[in-house]
Image: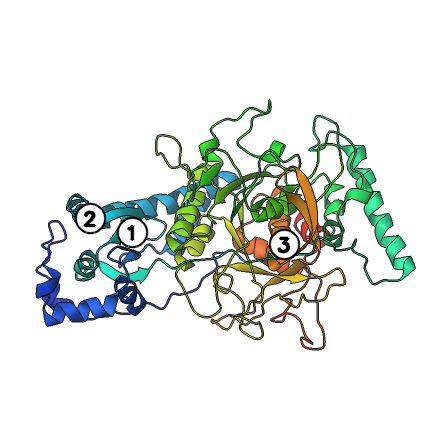
Amino acid sequence: MIKSKNIKKTLSVSFTALLAFSLISPVYGDSSTTTSAGASTISAKVSAKLNQQFSASEYVTYLVKLKDQVDTESVAKHAFQKASAEQISPAAAKLSVRTTVVNSLMDTAEKTQQSVEEYLKKEVNNGNVKKYKSYFIVNAFAVTSTKEVMDNLATLPEIDKILPDEKRELQKVEIDKDAQPVVEESTADQAVADQAAVDTAVTEVNAQKSVEESVYKDAVTPSRVEWNITKVKAPQVWAKGIDGKGVVVANLDTGVEYTHPALKRKWRGLNASGQVVNPELSWYDAVNGASLPTDSDGHGTHTMGTIVGSDSNGTNEVGVAPGAQWIAVRVFNPDTTDSILLDGGQWLLAPVDKNGKKHPELAPDVVNNSWGGGPGLDEWYRPVTQAWRAAQIFPEFSAGNTTWSNPGGAGSVANPANLPEAYATGATDVNNKLASFSLRGPSPYGEVKPEISAPGVNIRSSVPGGVYEGGWNGTSMAGPHTVGLAALLLQAKPSLTVDQLEDVISKTATPLTDSQYRTSPNNGYGYGLIDALAAVNSVLK
């Protein structure tokens, strides 16, 4: 079953006066002679904020959204029905649906963007357009041009809206390098029982895994399983022989240090001999163009570590799904904008080889998005999350952290985490208490947000330089736990759809309440703390 949410579409003003514009060979007038009808059309389509930007600069980058957009949910639904009728395997069905969705998006873009692109090419030659890029995940362009070009584009009947290319910032995390080892508030007997459960699970992992089969070269050391990994009961799932093997995860982040000992052998761009093979299909740098995974910030390496990280010698068990493979897209630097995030989101839907061919079969199964903006209704990234879902890519988003401009409280959950198609994760501490910085629901659509919670206080994971660092705090640290759990579930039952993954994770969570949130689910903890053991057991029945 595909998660269904209808987008409210704004109807544009009548374009009767514009029918003289041919879709094949449009005629563009000079902006100085724009008719009153044309001026009205421009005003209706162009963001007021964007017009203000042109008052400060001759060339401005903006997004041009076309009216003709693909209903990816409907496309996926029909593709599933066709696959079911053909009685093909679940894996083949999932690939068929994903390929159908991507092809539909690409076909629509190719058929509807031609006249706009011809005009932009002409204006490049005239010096009025510095650069442009077309997208298919959203039928749109990113254009850097003069205001005259923008106004001319706005008069075209096939154009829906022209929007600013907004600047986006990574969710800032708090790092307490002096943080002490985490100690849970529990009785001595309970602490002993909890440690015994982990020790037993780790012993079972080592007993059943041969050196050749294991993701570990040596035995797992119980004392090096991080508290947060123990908290979500991942070691007990490993004891069942389930560690995420065969599943591909991804993050849209600051990049990943692929040479890190906790991550290197899990990168899909390395073969069994440790040689780099077709790196462009397992890594995309949308900001700096680096050919191999790298991370100058640390955020992306830390989040990826919590998803899949583990040393080869059995120490530093920092990840929930240490058997999974990873790929990554670097989208964040100080100048990140909407167009860069669209670029990264599109690549994940269908990684691109050296010849420009798109490969939907190499898309990840799950994607971590430990980033976000302000609260409130903003659907700029909604088509991306819808396309991911339709293509059976699980879209996890961090709920967001309090800032000076968003101090939290009801309805503060960040965008895009507040979108209906996003599965949002809030942060808890070692005692299962909601972190003070974790943003809360409901969403602008009246839905419970976040959907789920995971540890996000004093998290230790991999950081650049081949080392580890604790004391990291943020919903950015919580979200990767949910991604790791999704990977475990997909190994346990590969046929699970995105909707089914959500249902399993939510329904098997440990309900959490407090003096403010007295019933569950609620807009602080969602359905509660993820429980990897309960979730996996539920799909193995």
Question: Is disc 3 surrounded by few (<14), some (14 to 19) or many (20+) residues within 10 Å?
Answer: many
Q: Earlier in the sequence, mark 3 or mark 1?
A: 1
**Labels 1 and 2 touching (C-beta < 8 A):** yes
Above or below, 231 against 278 in this view is below
Q: Position of residue 257 (x, y in %)?
A: 57, 38
Dot 3 falls on a residue whose secondary structure is helix
Q: Furthest-front residue in view?
A: 56
Q: Is residue 119 left or right of residue 69?
A: left
Q: Which residue is mark 2?
A: 120
**Res 141 label:** 1
Q: Nearer the viewer, residue 223 or 449?
A: 223
Question: Is disc 1 surrounded by few (<14), some (14 to 19) or many (20+) residues within 10 Å?
Answer: many
Q: Nearer the viewer, residue 124 or 329?
A: 124
Q: Residue at x 28, y 48 (%)?
A: 109
Q: Position of residue 450 (x, y in %)?
A: 58, 65
Q: Which residue is mark 3?
A: 477
Q: Amino acid at mark 3?
A: Met
Q: Nearer the viewer, residue 412 or 494?
A: 412
In space, the residues marked 1 and 2 are separated at their CA atoms by: 10 Å
